[in-house]
Amino acid sequence: MRLPHLWIVLIILNTASIAMSAPVVGGLTGNGANNERLRGLTLLSELNCTACHETNLDLPLRKRGPELDLLGERFVLDHILKFVTSPHDVKPGTVMPDVLGHLSEQRKLEVVSAIMGHLVGQPNHTTTRRKIERGDPREGEKLFGTIGCIACHRAATDDEGVPLGSPGQHRRLVEFLKNPLRHRPSGRMPDMGLTHFEAVDLAAYLRRRDRTPGRMIILERAPAEIGRKYFSVFGCVQCHNRPDADRKSYAPLSELRVDQGCLSGKRGAWPQYELSQSQTAELKTALELHSKPLTETQEIDLRLTQLNCLACHQRGEIGGPSDAKNPHFTGNDSNLGDQGRIPPPLTGAGAKLNPDWMRKALAKGESVRPYLHTRMPAFGETNVAPLIKLFSEVDKSDPIQIERVKDAKQAKNNGGKLVGNRGGLNCVACHTWRLESAAPIKALDLTTITERLRENWFHRYMRNPQHYQPLTIMPAYWPDGKATLKTVLDGNTSQQIDAIWQYLSYGRNVRAPAGIVREPMQIFVRDETVMLRRNYQGIGRRGIGVGYPAKVNLAFDAGQMRLGAIWRGDFIEASAAFRGQGSGAVHMMSRNVIRFPEGAAFAVLNSAEQAWPTNVARRLPGFQFKGYILDDLQRPTFAYEFKGSQITDRFVDRKESNGYFKRDIKVIDPPDGLHFRAATGGKLERVDERTVRVGRTLQIQFPSEPIIRRKELLFDLTGTTELKLEYRW
């Protein structure tokens, strides 16, 4: 039955009276910021005051509100209506202001139904029937309590943390949990790296926690243009981006009067936040001092507070799990003490960590601590890039004089001996090697040390571990700078540490130290293609390795929908993916792996001069992996979606010329301006009119004219439904 002019809406009526609650900002709970100005600046940011009131300070004081394009699909309309009409009743503690509080109840319903008509459009009466995966709420509750959700959100039994909103429709909630940055791009709800089935279980738990009765009412739906007008008039567009709505100008922060408007405590035609007295005082302090620049250290604290990093990590005197949340931080190796359950401190992080590793950890959620149950979330490149730069600029340590072992072979041999258990320091007694362990303790993996750490910090830490982490179980092998082992490199402290560093710098590409017994688990390819979906270096957990009979191999990134790597020869060594915790990376069996750029392989550009998107998040907005189809030789054709276009991506191995790949990309309904980035490199050289050399060895052949710019090889797919390429190396 079609009802083109009516909204049928279920209004949630909570039978218990709901007490008003001041806005809850995650970073200001627990052991978060304790400085009044910092707390006030955080409120300016998280309440999004600068969405209306501009500031001349170069500070991250504005966040993007949730994306509304899928609003009607994710939430049932009853919740939208009730929440917008009275946000503080429906979700006590929300940072969403009540912008309609000065209107009568009838007028509120008229305005909200009109806005809903603008946002949601005509109700969709033709839905596709799908089997709903119900999930196990008991498993979801375990996830909620262990992987880090509870660090920010309230548990069912306490009131510390950000309150949970309405879970919405089950299928859409699952999609949200798998890719929250798509809906909330400001990173306040980061990507927890959930598998599909984990998201299904967690959604089942969240829906079980939300059981609110209601009744049915019917509202007249206003024309969409009226809703568009109200969306601007009542300030919704200030926080929520809509290209078809006009933003208004308001007084800048420097001209605000605290006895009027939002901070006055009075009711009127302005947003009502239900601020507490302390929050009002903190905001006033921030406004009084807002023209005073922050130091770089203060800006770091502000950004950590905004993203609520301090719920898990301590930096200096602030942050770390609160007393209420601390018991929820657990691990699977009690031998490591608190280091085996509490995420590491961020004190001195810039002096400790390489910027590239910080980017992987903060933007993509890379982690090297499988013994922690709490996961490192992905916040997205845009949200953390300034923080990475600030860490590097603020956290400095004096350079230490390093006495090198000049002979590389001598350094490698002595470094391996020191790490092992035959006449060495027996580091393998506690640390894993390629995630393999010789003892019950499984501390940080040694093969990632030089990828993550700065060499200067490593030398300082090795001399005095307790200075950096007083409760560490790491022994001091060079107390007061003097080596306890005199038989290696004549007991020279600096050379011993340098030898260890040089040995570890080979990563996985060096013989394991004595004490680690590890049989290889090599996967061979014979007469048909072999696939393995696992964690691949440079790609992550959504990697798909494919080995072909022609002795050419590839790794595909199903998170970013891109070709990640190609190599010739044997396929993979996969023991790290199956032993221990099973979270290790698969090793590609070649020293000459050709890697392709991280980030989107497809983008819509307005012109050939427009810069390529720099987002390298683990899952990119606009993309959706659809799986793959196997042919008779088990060769996959990958299928994915980008901005509504269906794309198939097929690789065929050829034995001629020592083996190479033919690639066939087909696009259904490509949008105008669709471009494909085939490669980037230090040097792109035109071999002939249909071939480009990338770097030293890779040659890409193509049938149509490419765009070569700034070391990028692009193809304009506007009006094109197929692109055929050859990869030879």
Image: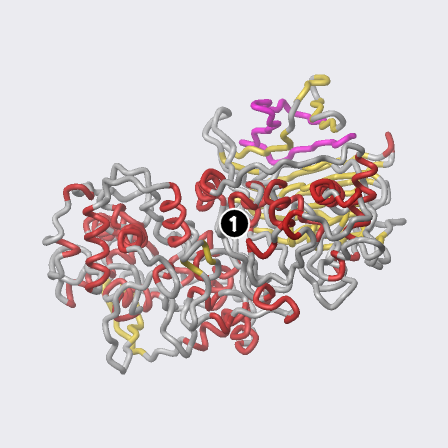
Residue 403 position within the rendered picture, expressed as x and y whole percent measured from the top left: 70, 35
Q: Nearer the viewer, residue 229 or 428?
A: 428
**Residue at position x 55%, y 43% in the image:** 616
Q: Nearer the viewer, residue 178 or 298?
A: 298
Residue on which disc 1 sits: 362
**Residue at position x 34%, y 60% in the image:** 28
Residue 274 position within the rendered picture, expressed as x and y whole percent measured from the top left: 21, 64
Residue 488 position within the rendered picture, expressed as x and y whole percent measured from the top left: 81, 46
Residue 177 in the figure: left or right of residue 239: right
Crowd around label 1: few <14 · some 14–19 · many ≥20 (10 Å): many
Residue 450 position within the rendered picture, expressed as x and y whole percent measured from the top left: 67, 44
Q: Nearer the viewer, residue 388 or 582?
A: 388
Q: Quadrant of residue 266?
A: bottom left
Q: Amino acid at mark 1?
A: Leu
- 728 part of magenta stretch: yes
Q: Which quadrant, please, contains the N terminus?
A: bottom left
Q: Which residues are magenta?
A: 701-729
State the colouring used for the structure image.
Answer: secondary structure
**Secondary structure beneath disc 1?**
helix
- 12 part of magenta stretch: no
Residue 558 is at least partly visible in this image: no
